[in-house]
Amino acid sequence: MWFGGDWPGYERTRIRVYVDSEARAGIDMELGMGHGVGFGDGGAPWGSKRLGKTGHPSGLYNTYRIPFGKSVRVTGQMSDVVKGQPPFWWIIRGTENLPVTIGGVQLSPNAWLKLHKLENYTVQPLEEFALCDVKGDGALYQVTIAAKGRRTGTEEKWKDISYLEACMRAYIGGSDQPLMLSSGLEDYFLGTYYFNRGRYANELAGLTHLDTGANTFSAYRFHDEDPIFFQNGLRLTCRCGEKVGDRVIGNPPPTDYTTYVWIYSW
């Protein structure tokens, strides 16, 4: 998929994908977050073979594999802030009888790609919250997080963004013991030291937005080369900050999160 156009609120255009006569779209995404970009960040060009942004405000593309059996229907809807009827260009391509693989493993022919969303959710300090809670079998494909800390002006500035100390956790098969996916939230996205070198994009992960004054960031992470398969369910969680034993690391503020989790289910 590739999308072009130029108008205020472009990144909030909603794309829906209906597979095999779904009554409700299994993929319902805003253009920005659906391509790993939060807060309407216009930075470009950047990209990898899986997704990217080549222009302003558009040139968004992705190569996500969306399996279907008999039919697929893709729709677009502009956000409610759009005036008039601005021109909109798109390209959608595909093929038939091509298997989907993750980490070299061919997925079930019954696999569907589903998008699980959490939007504008306010999390309290040290609260652990679920990005998705999926039943059955499947594989984690991609995660995007956009977050904004609700406090500024602390004398030690790093504490205002110390919600980034969060560890990502995966609870597989109903277990109450997590598989630890990172040692901090920026680490999960392959960044370091609170993203202290700024934006980056590669095949596995990328930082698409960072504003240390507003305490905001957005980033994406793929799991096709380091796959996480699961049976009997997956609950993926994050935390607003972290503590080791009784010691809280920093002073994480209440934080607003929007998260997109892409999962192949079968």
Image: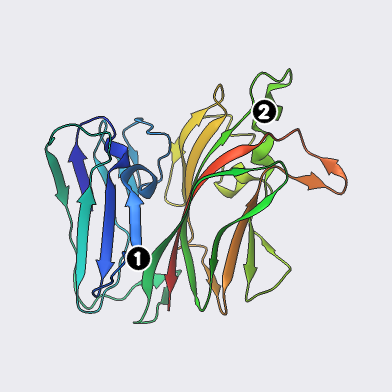
- Residue 47, given in percent of the width and then of the height, sits at 34, 43
In the image, farthest residue toward the right: 246
The residue carrying mark 1 is 26
Name which residue type carries label 1: Gly
Closer to the eye: label 1 or 2: 1
**CA separation in Å, label 1 and label 2:** 36 Å
Q: Earlier in the sequence, mark 1 or mark 2?
A: 1
Q: What kind of element bears circle 2?
A: helix
Q: Classify residue 25 as left or right of residue 200.
A: left
Mark 1 is surrounded, within 10 Å at the Cα level, by few (under 14), some (14 to 19) or many (20 or more) other residues, namely some
- The residue under the point 27% across, 36% down is 10
- Residue 140, given in percent of the width and then of the height, sits at 49, 65
- Residue 164, given in percent of the width and then of the height, sits at 64, 39
Between 25 and 233, the residue placed more toward the observer is 25
Between 66 and 63, the residue placed more toward the observer is 66
Name which residue type carries label 2: Asp
Mark 2 is surrounded, within 10 Å at the Cα level, by few (under 14), some (14 to 19) or many (20 or more) other residues, namely many
The residue carrying mark 2 is 160
- Residue 257, given in percent of the width and then of the height, sits at 54, 43
Viewport quadrant of the C terminus: bottom left
Q: What kind of element bears circle 1?
A: loop
Quarter of the figure with residue 66: bottom left
Between 257 and 207, the residue placed more toward the observer is 257
Numbered label attached to residue 198: none
Q: Say if residue 194 shows up in the picture.
A: yes
